């Protein structure tokens, strides 16, 4: 044991590998394994007579997904909702995070962070149905039932995931830069455009990854407040349940994965991921 301990003490890389072995194994088996099973199942089909899964390679699910106009509309609607949620959260979160990081006292910051995290402790369904009460006919915001209600509900649900990364980015921003810009006569908008925004852009990207991906795959909120509107998640859910077509559900589920890979590739070209 003494020799082993001495060896591990000298080999920092070996210690790190041993520490990471369990979480990496879990990632490989539970997450990547599930994704692999998803992609494989997407190339299967269902026997129309027996309803049994046919494990024969076929492109029919992806062909139906690409050629079906209704599915193209649902994909575009889902991406649009996810983008709208991200923009709404960014507009609301940035001034809140700035006030927390640069205007509040150190003691107040801790309480403000707790206040931001508090809604995450409540049930998803409770919050979604609370918005349904406000957005339904006769409610406080009865005019918004439908896709508008879906965007508002999802923006509220995922807002903390945008506030916290931006707050962390702004907290690292040296106050001396803002003071120097003010001393040199720069107006508020120019300070924001040339100093604050470029230095916090990686944090904005981090928050947008959360809000965009969570909104893109959500199916519960649109069921509760979205009226007859459908998103990608609803198509997946319906094909797993009522339609009993797991292969087509798997094919549809690959769409958010592909969209997110494209989004990550796009933001990687900006260099934001390297600065997170």
Image: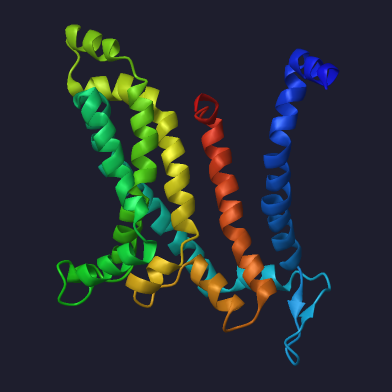
Q: Is residue 94 visible?
A: no
Image position of 139 (left or right of 79): left
Q: Position of residue 92 (x, y in %)?
A: 26, 43
Percent coordinates x, y for residue 124 in the rendering: 38, 61
Q: Residue furthest bottom?
A: 49
Q: Quadrant of residue 43?
A: bottom right
The structure residue drawn at horizontal position 38% and vertical position 78%, both measured from the top left corner, is 228
Whole-percent x and y of residue 265?
58, 39
Q: Residue at x 37, y 51 (%)?
A: 158
Q: Is 102 on the left-hand or right-hand side of 32?
A: left
Residue at the spot 36% in from the left edge and 53% down from the top edge: 121
Task: Name the quadrant containing residue 20.
Answer: top right
**Residue 111 visible in this rendered orientation of the protein:** yes
Residue 276, percent from left and from top: 49, 28
Q: Check the image and name the residue furthest to the front.
A: 1
Q: Looking at the image, is 166 positioned above or below residue 219?
A: above
231 versus 266 height, above or below:
below
In which quadrant will I find the N terminus? top right
Q: Residue at x 65, y 67 (%)?
A: 250
The vertical placement of 133 against 89, above or below, is: below
| The one of 68 and 58 positioned closer to us in this rendering | 58
Q: Nearer the viewer, residue 255 or 108?
A: 108
């Amino acid at each position: 044991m003494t020799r082993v301990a001495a060896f591990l003490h000298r080999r920092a890389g070996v210690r790190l590998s041993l520490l990471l072995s369990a979480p990496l194994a879990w990632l490989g088996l539970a997450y990547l394994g599930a994704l692999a099973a998803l992609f494989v199942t997407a190339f299967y089909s269902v026997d129309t007579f027996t309803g049994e899964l046919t494990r024969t390679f076929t492109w029919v699910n992806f062909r139906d997904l690409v050629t079906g106009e209704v599915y193209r509309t649902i994909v575009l609607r889902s991406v649009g909702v996810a983008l709208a949620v991200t923009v709404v959260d960014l507009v609301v979160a940035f001034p809140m995070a700035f006030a927390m990081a640069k205007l509040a006292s150190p003691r107040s910051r801790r309480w403000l962070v707790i206040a931001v995290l508090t809604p995450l402790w409540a049930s998803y369904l409770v919050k979604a149905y609370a918005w349904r009460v406000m957005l339904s006919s006769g409610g406080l915001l009865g005019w918004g039932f439908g896709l508008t209600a879906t965007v508002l509900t999802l923006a509220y649900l995922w807002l903390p995931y945008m506030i916290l990364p931006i707050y962390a980015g702004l907290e690292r921003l040296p106050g001396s830069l803002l003071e120097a810009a003010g001393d040199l006569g720069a107006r508020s908008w120019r300070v924001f455009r040339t100093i604050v925004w470029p230095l916090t852009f990686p944090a904005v990207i981090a928050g947008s990854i959360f809000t965009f991906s969570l909104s893109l795959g959500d199916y519960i909120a649109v069921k509760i407040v979205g009226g007859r509107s459908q998103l990608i998640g609803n198509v997946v859910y319906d094909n797993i349940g009522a339609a009993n077509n797991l292969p087509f559900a798997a094919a549809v589920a690959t769409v958010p994965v592909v969209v997110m890979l494209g989004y990550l590739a796009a933001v990687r070209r900006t260099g934001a991921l390297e600065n997170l």
